[in-house]
Image (spheres, rainbow, N blue to C red):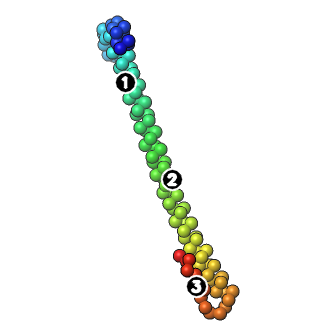
């Protein structure tokens, strides 16, 4: 309210080749504020999209690494069973209820 009450002085705006005469200073102030907000929002939006793509790439990488850990765990378990079999040489396959 204070800004609109005391800033009705007419000003001229020069935008390159365009000249806009006799616009109240109040409109120039509000226009500059809104322009700044729009530019800030666009910068935020670009940064947010960039971060989203970065997270998507990291999530795919994490999933791939988890799959690799699972495969290695299965392989370790198979080797443990084979090791037990070779230790006993009795021909009986050890029964593991926790096998994958």
Q: Disc 2 on helix, strand or loop?
A: helix
Point out the frontmost of discs 3 and 2.
Answer: 3
Please provide percent x and percent y for residue 2.
38, 12
- Among the two numbered marks 3 and 2 on one chain, the one whose residue lies closer to the N terminus: 2
Which quadrant would residue 92 be assigned to in this image? bottom right
Please provide percent x and percent y for residue 44.
44, 35
Q: Is residue 86 left or right of residue 4?
A: right
Q: Within 10 angstroms of label 2, few (less than 14), some, or many (20 or more) residues?
A: few
Can you identify the residue that label 2 sits on?
58
Discs 3, 1 touching: Cβ within 8 Å = no
Q: Disc 3 on helix, strand or loop?
A: loop
Q: Is residue 43 left or right of residue 17?
A: right
Residue sticking out furthest to the top: 9
Q: Is residue 29 left or right of residue 80?
A: left
C-alpha distance separating marks 3 and 2: 39 Å
Q: Disc 1 on helix, strand or loop?
A: helix
Above/below status of 48 relative to 97: above
In what quadrant of the picture does the N terminus appear?
A: top left
Can you identify the residue that label 3 sits on?
95
The circle drawn on residue 34 is 1
- Among the two numbered marks 1 and 2 on one chain, the one whose residue lies closer to the N terminus: 1
Q: Within 10 angstroms of label 3, few (less than 14), some, or many (20 or more) residues?
A: few
Please provide percent x and percent y for residue 11.
35, 8
């Amino acid at each position: 309210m204070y800004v609109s009450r005391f800033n009705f002085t007419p000003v001229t705006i020069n935008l390159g080749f365009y000249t806009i005469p006799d616009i109240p200073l109040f409109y120039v102030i509000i226009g500059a504020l809104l322009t700044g907000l729009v530019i800030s929002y666009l910068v935020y939006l670009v940064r947010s999209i960039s971060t989203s793509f970065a997270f998507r790439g990291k999530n795919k990488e994490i999933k791939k690494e988890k799959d690799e850990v699972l495969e290695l765990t299965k392989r370790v378990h198979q080797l443990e069973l084979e090791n037990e079999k070779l230790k006993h040489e009795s021909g009986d396959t050890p029964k593991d209820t926790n096998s994958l």
